[in-house]
Amino acid sequence: MTDDFVSLSGWTRECLPAFLHRIVALPSVDSTNRLARTMIDETPWPGNAIVVADRQTHGRGRFTRRWESPAGVGLWFTLLLNTEWPRDKLFQLTFMSALAVGDAVQETLGRAPRLKWPNDVLIGDRKLCGILLETASRREANFVMVGVGLNVNQDSFPAEMRSSATSLRLECGRILSRATVLKNILDRFGEYYLRGGQRILSLWKERADCWGRSVRVRQPDRLIEGIARDLADDGALIVEVDGTLEKVYAGDVEA
């Protein structure tokens, strides 16, 4: 393990924000979301937790895509939350996570990133962070796994990713402490989370820059082209297509 991850793996309960009760830090896992899912069956339930790995061998993005997660350079983690929020409000945690990452990125770089519907954080047109939200149940309890992949100290990317990906190091020109970046994200997420989701969607809307612009939403069986108009109360992107407002719940947005 690299030195900065060794310091992170030494965190105790006192290092965590109030909403978290446990940290599981490992040198390598297949997927932090997958490991978090297995923790749900523990008896007794260990409380809200974070699973963080120096490396993922089978990191996942949306639509079962692979997320490159090499050792020593990124933040690959999952927040495992046992929440009493109604199931129809859980989607807000995706937007909440993007806000928290965006806050930490702005503190690091001194400039605000772009938030892209529904779950990406970008610098310019290059992807810096992706978020994957999954849910599970145990008896009467609802659990949420918020998986975050943030490029921190990469100084290069494979040829096929060079035009579409970036890292904090490439943007600021220096190597960063992943433990410090993670602490900033968790502190900001905790502030949002303990508010119970208040104003999350309106805050996200303020920081997205797609409103009034032409977008293309690529779905497995359809391409939607129109003008991005708003974010619905249920998290859908509202796109004006030939004068008609249409709610879009899934897809890849191309601005």
Image (tube, helix red, strand yellow):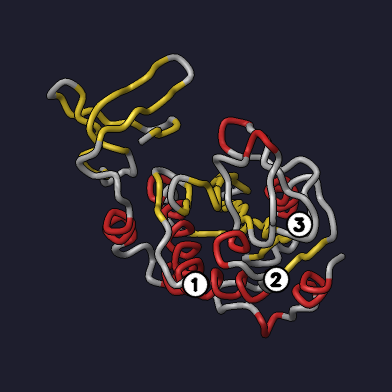
Secondary structure of the residue carrying numbered label 1? helix
| Left or right of 174 in this view: 131 | left
| Left or right of 80 in this view: 207 | left
Q: What residue is pinned by disc 1?
A: 190
Residues under numbered marks 1 and 3 in contact, where contact means CB atoms less than 8 Å apart: no
Instruction: Determine whether 192 is above or below 160 in the image.
Output: below
Numbered circle sitting on residue 42: 3
Which percent across, then down, holds residue 163?
56, 40
* Near-viewer residue (116 or 47): 116
Looking at the image, the residue that sits furthest to the top is 221
* Near-viewer residue (96 or 227): 227
**Label 1 neighbourhood size at 10 Å, few (<14), some (14-19), many (20+)?**
some
* Residue 143 showing in the rendered view: no
Task: Indicate which disc, 1 or 2, sits on the residue closer to the N terminus.
Answer: 2
Q: What residue type is labelled 2?
A: Arg
Secondary structure of the residue carrying numbered label 2? strand
**Label 3 neighbourhood size at 10 Å, few (<14), some (14-19), many (20+)?**
few
